[in-house]
Amino acid sequence: MKRYMKSNYEYTKLRKNFGRQPLFQEVPAHLLDSINPNVEQQKLYILRNPVHRTIQATMPQSEHDANTKQLVMHEQGINHSEGGWPRDVHLYNEDHLARHRRRVQHEDGYVNAILSLRPQIEHCIDQNNAIDMYQTYFANMYQQAPVEKYNLQIANIFRDPFERPASCIVWTNETQSRLVASYSYQVYGPEQDSKISTICYMWDINKQTEPLYEFCPENSCWRLTCSPVTPEVLLAGLNSGTINIFDIREGRSAVSKSSVYNSHRGPISGLLYGHSRTNSEFFSGSPDGQCLWWDIRNISKPIDQLYMSVRHGHHVSPSFSNAEGVSCLEFDKGLPTKFLSGTESGLVINANRMGRSHSEILASYWYAHTGPVRAVHRSPCTLRMFITCGDWSVRIWSEEVRTAPIIVTRPYRYQVTDVAWAPLRYSCYMAVCEGGVFYYWDILRKQREPVATLQVSKHGLTRVIAHPEGESIAVSDNHGSIYILHLSENMTTPGNQDKHLVHQIYDRETRREHILDNRVKEIRLKIRGEDITCLDREASIAEEDVLKTTEEEYFKIVNDEINKMDELFTKHNILE
Amino acid sequence: MANEAEETVRKLSAHKGVVGVVVVNGEGIPIKTTLDNHVSVQYAGLLGSLVDKAKSVVRDLDPTNDLTFLRIRSKKSEVMVAPDKEFILIVVQNPVE
């Protein structure tokens, strides 16, 4: 390659000629040089066609990257076997170590430290020597049974718009039970104001604003009962002593009514279904003293009648004059031919329908309460045990023991108006009283006081009835409100041993009463025996003595009284 | 005074069940010990840091509080540590029961 020719023109000039301005002369044009194209050289070149050239119109940029120096990290453990010695002490020189140690031991700090730490550490050493603190305690103890918590809650309230006291509540016999309630002012006397409504309601327990159905008996209804087969059929025992049959499907008024002449002479105080193959027989009781049996298919007249008289003499036949008024009835399907009735005079009569004579029918009776027996119920656990309530107390009786109740509890503050057994839990019963309080008793757990109480209402409570499954209890009060109470789980289901234990209680108490009874009889016999022998010997003498002493006493008392009267008389005169 | 300290340590180690007593200073060296050297050194080193940690735990939870005593119960023995401002007193005991 030929060297690139410099396009310079070098010339020398004398120094003295510097600075002189260039003087230009005008010269005509004249050829200085002429270079002819060299054909040989031309052949060495060709025309480049096409020409590819890329151009980009950008700012010139450049890139450069740099990085810090990488730090290499490495984990390593060190085993510090011994150290902490001051610099002048060498580890391997035992003398040095010992000397250092001795020096430290002589320091004040060291001595004080040891002396002050000593008591505490001695305490702990002694502690360890004394007992084994770290053992697992109570490893061998059995787990305690959970404490039963009783819970009573008012779930729902159904109010009567007329605020009449509820006379009877029943659950219907179906899976989705409904509550039927009747209201009446239970006062004896002439027929009440017709302005007081006699409407009875059937409530759906989930809907408390208004009743499901209403039905209207002609008088106020005292007792209700539901048919076991058809839950829509209801029987009502009225104030006038008649029975009305209602069918909810038909309407508000009674489907059939019994005649006033054939029915009871007083309001109906007990109405229950009896035992029959066709489930059509029921019986009723009333304070007039008779029990009547009816057939539901035709209630124009009763099928059977019984005077409830037990305390008549031997030669007197039972009739209205000596009959005891019935205040409540009880019937259990387990004993199909027997029933219990509580009377107005406070007796409980055990009746057997299959008796041949009157005395066999009304087999036995108990003096239960002072005042009418408000409720009688047999226990679902043992049919031979029944509970009664009346006046201010609740008593549990055994059929085998005539003289006294087998279980008594303290008298209540208010009159007890109704009592009911818990349907599934054998050892429990519920009582309601005039003070508006609901008591739940469990005779196995607490004998002296109820296991749970609840002040349900301000007014007195009239009836209590438990749903057959035991969880809901319907309680009614004097102002027409019906409360549904919910019980907690442990109040509805029985414990494992409950039935057995309740049987044991029953047996034990019955035996106790028998023993007491026998003992009393023995004592009485002995006394009578002694008396007879005494009287034989000193009969006449004793009699005269007794007569004389009583005469003297009598005259003394009389004289005292006369003197007192004289004094008063004179005082009275003086005052006047 | 030093004798009293000696006496104390001797009495402590004479208690029933006590295996050994070690007194450790702030730098982690066993000043006085009734066990042999390498065991004491192990105890000193390991428990020193544990006491510091325990102390910091107690004081972190409540700054007005302070660690008074530390007891470590293991299957075979119990180690009781009493910390002080400069020293740590360690006692190893076998429960007699």
Image: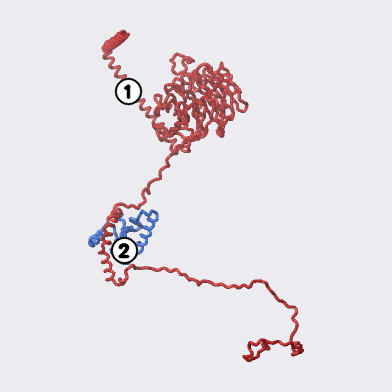
Chain colours: A red, B blue
**Residue at 66% in and 71% down:** A58
From this view, report whether residue B93 is shown above or below residue A354. Answer: below
Viewer-side residue, B77 vs A525: B77
Mark toward the viewer: 2 or 1:
2
* Residue A560 visible in rendering: yes
Tell me the distance, in whole angstroms, between the alpha carbons under discs 2 and 1: 93 Å
Q: In the rendered image, which quarter contains the C terminus of chain A?
A: top left
Q: Which mark is residue A523?
A: 1
From this view, report whether residue A101 is shown above or below residue A5. Answer: above
* Residue A183 place in picture, x, y as percent: 53, 24
Q: In the rendered image, which quarter contains the N terminus of chain A?
A: bottom right
Instruction: Identify the residue position indicated by label 2 in the image.
Output: B25
Q: Secondary structure at mark 2?
A: loop
How dense is the environment of label 1, judged by Cα within 10 Å: few (below 14), some, or many (20 and up)? few
Q: Secondary structure at mark 1?
A: helix
From this view, report whether residue A54 is shown above or below residue A558. Answer: below
Kind of residue sitting beneath label 2? Asn
**Residue at 56% in and 17% down:** A262
How dense is the environment of label 2, judged by Cα within 10 Å: few (below 14), some, or many (20 and up)? many
Pointers 2 and 1 within a single chain? no
- Residue B94 position by quadrant: bottom left
Kind of residue sitting beneath label 1? Ile
* Residue A139 place in picture, x, y as percent: 38, 49
Viewer-side residue, A81 vs B38: A81
Viewer-side residue, A382 vs A444: A444
Viewer-side residue, A249 vs A462: A462
* Residue A547 visible in rendering: no
Q: Which mark is residue A293?
A: none
